Amino acid sequence: MTITKDIINQSSSDSSLIKTLENMIDGESNETKSLRNLIAMVSQSNSTALILGETGTGKDIVAQAIHKCSKKKGSFVTVNCAAIPSELLESELFGHEKGSFTGADKLRKGRFEQSSGGSLFLDEIGDMPLPLQAKLLRAIESKLIQRVGGTDDIKIDLRLICATHRDLEKKVESGEFRADLFFRINVLPINVPSLAERRTDIPSLLKTLVKNLNEEKSTLPIFTPDAITALTKHNWPGNVRELKNVIERACIIFPGKEVTSTNVFENLLRLKMPTVAEEQNAIWEMTSDLSEINSLEFDEVTNNPEDFLPHPNNYKNWFTFYDEIDLRRHQQDIEIILIESALEKTGNKIALAADKLKLRRTTLIEKMRKYSITAN
């Protein structure tokens, strides 16, 4: 069954649950509200939940929210499947008996037993070794486990929550992930939206992150409205984790000072300490009457409007955050946006729009046909 937004919104069940979720997951965008409603619905079931989303979107927070809103009273136990060596992961999950291997000098309960009565969160399950996937499948289906070196079945009673930034369907096709395990954990899928998909939440997230990072309000940076606007326009390939790092950077570089849009681009998104001259210029900008600035004054500052375009080097580190990039799709999206903007700027005059884009008129017309763009 497909979980549609209508079904999610109908399930805004208990107001106390939503209140709890609002305290845990910031934002008032439609995407965030739908996410909170979905979590409220999923938390009332004992079925396995699979949290999907890009790196840094806050999948761990969603897992904690599911546990906190559930009827489970036990512990919330986390295991990062990618951070533990494969030869130790089995013992970490299922525990071991005394003497089962070198160094096992006493019985040790694994994370499954530790989370009995509560929730077990298997983060980055897409990185779990194949041999261990079979044992996990058995544990999920039978609700029984065996410690390493043991023969007795141990009954478990817990809520299993899994998460990954990997495309599990592709990993199933390549044979890196068991199909039966994928279908077993994909009972209640939750797709966490990227930060770029919920940009309107950034002011709220900014306020919360600044408050959490430093309790001494006198030393907190003060983000101007234009700085907040600049933050909302960033692509955020690292999502909320990247935003948190940027805010922490601001607390270190600009304690108790105003942060402008220039600071966002020059000092926060790219780590560069402001010089004395730059700080003086920032003060001048804040005290100047911006309404008196005209296009002639702008030309005095720079004769090259391309200085304000994204630099190609900005894309250099994208593979730090993404496993793959659809280059053709990305180029197409950029062309569509710029062509539509040029047409809007010139009152849909194709010749003028072509001049602004430094294209021949016939080339622009061909691109408009290709992307089904019309000049109204």
Image (spheres, rainbow, N blue to C red):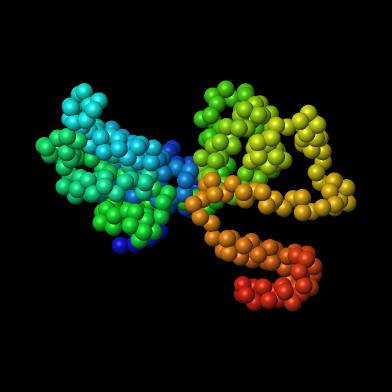
Where residue 201 sits: x, y (%)? 54, 46
Q: Compared to 329, does 166 lie above or below? A: above
Residue nearest the viewer, comparing 342 with 148: 148
Residue 372, horizontal then vertical, whole percent: 61, 75
Which quadrant does the C terminus fall into? bottom right
Residue 15 place in picture, x, y as percent: 36, 44
Front residue of 273 and 252: 273
Q: Does residue 353 appear left or right of residue 133 in this picture?
A: right
Q: Is residue 168 above or below residue 75?
A: below
Vertical order, 166 against 104 (above or below): below
**Residue 349 seen in render:** no
On-image quarter of the N terminus: bottom left
Q: Position of residue 38 (x, y in %)?
A: 37, 51
Callout count: 0
User: Is residue 190 visible to us here?
Assistant: yes
**333 lies above or below 35:** below
Q: In the image, 296: left or right of 355?
A: right
Query: Residue extending furthest left?
Result: 152
Quadrant of the rendered image containing residue 8: bottom left
Residue plotted at (54% across, 37% down): 244
Which residue is drawn at the image coordinates 62% and 49% (left, top)? Answer: 316
Residue located 45% across and 42% down the image: 58
Q: Is residue 321 left or right of residue 147?
A: right
**Residue drawn at point x = 51 percent, y = 42 percent:** 240
Of all residues, the one furthest to the front in this rendering is 102
